[in-house]
Amino acid sequence: MPDDRQFDQMMPGQLLARGVCRHLRQAHGFACVEELVPTRGLRVDVMALGPKGEIWVVECKSSRADFQSDHKWGGYLDWCDRFFWAVDANFPADLLPEGTGLIIADAYDGEIIRMGPETRLAAARRKVTTRTFARHAAMRLHMVRDPGVSEAWG
């Protein structure tokens, strides 16, 4: 976990993701992985796996331009039970689509302002997504523990 001195090396979206992950873990018991690729061509900012197996996707938007340039977010809906936007307190939240969740966050914490509607994944998709989550998380942990080996994984 980065300390305050490392914040200047993080992008604004990464700071939001950090706060979102902290909140989901501390308040809701979720395990989170940042920048996960559920399928070719998609990369979610945060995928969260809940204590009952629920899967949430959170897209972090640091500015109006960042949001307006994102045209892939609709594809993320097929990979989660709930979808959320995470923005800071100064973001114009009225830009965000109705029928999506909203989290206000900073680098330290977040708060769910609007719960994303639930659309349960089919069992087969849930199995694939959970397996992808688990493998990704395990590989990330291994890269921290043994960085020389991780280079061979690509």
Image (spheres, helix red, strand yellow):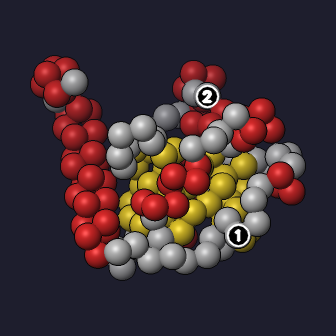
Q: Are marks 2 and 1 in contact (CB under 8 Å)?
A: no
Would residue 106 be found to the left or right of residue 35 on screen? right
- Amino acid type indicated by mark 2: Met
| 9 left or right of 96 in image | left
- Image mark for residue 88: none
The x, y position of residue 96, in whole percent, is: 77, 55
Is residue 145 rendered to the left or right of residue 62?
left
- Residue 34 image position (x, y, % from top left): 44, 44
Residue 11's label in the rendered image is 2
**Within-10-Å neighbours for mark 1: few <14, some 14–19, many 20+:** few
Quarter where residue 118 is shown = bottom right
Q: Is residue 63 visible?
A: no
Dot 2 falls on a residue whose secondary structure is loop
Judging from the image, what secondary structure is the residue with disc 1 in?
A: loop
**Residue 78 appears in the picture as rendered:** yes
**Height in image: 100 above or below 143?**
below
* Residue 154 or residue 150, whichever sits in front: 154
Q: In the rendered structure, which amino acid carries the disc numbered 1?
A: Gly
Name the quadrant of the C terminus: top left
Q: Which residue is mark 1?
A: 99
Q: Nearer the viewer, mark 2 or mark 1?
A: 1
Question: For residue 53, which quarter of the picture?
Answer: bottom left
How packed is label 2: few (under 14 Cα within 10 Å), some, or many (20 or more)? few
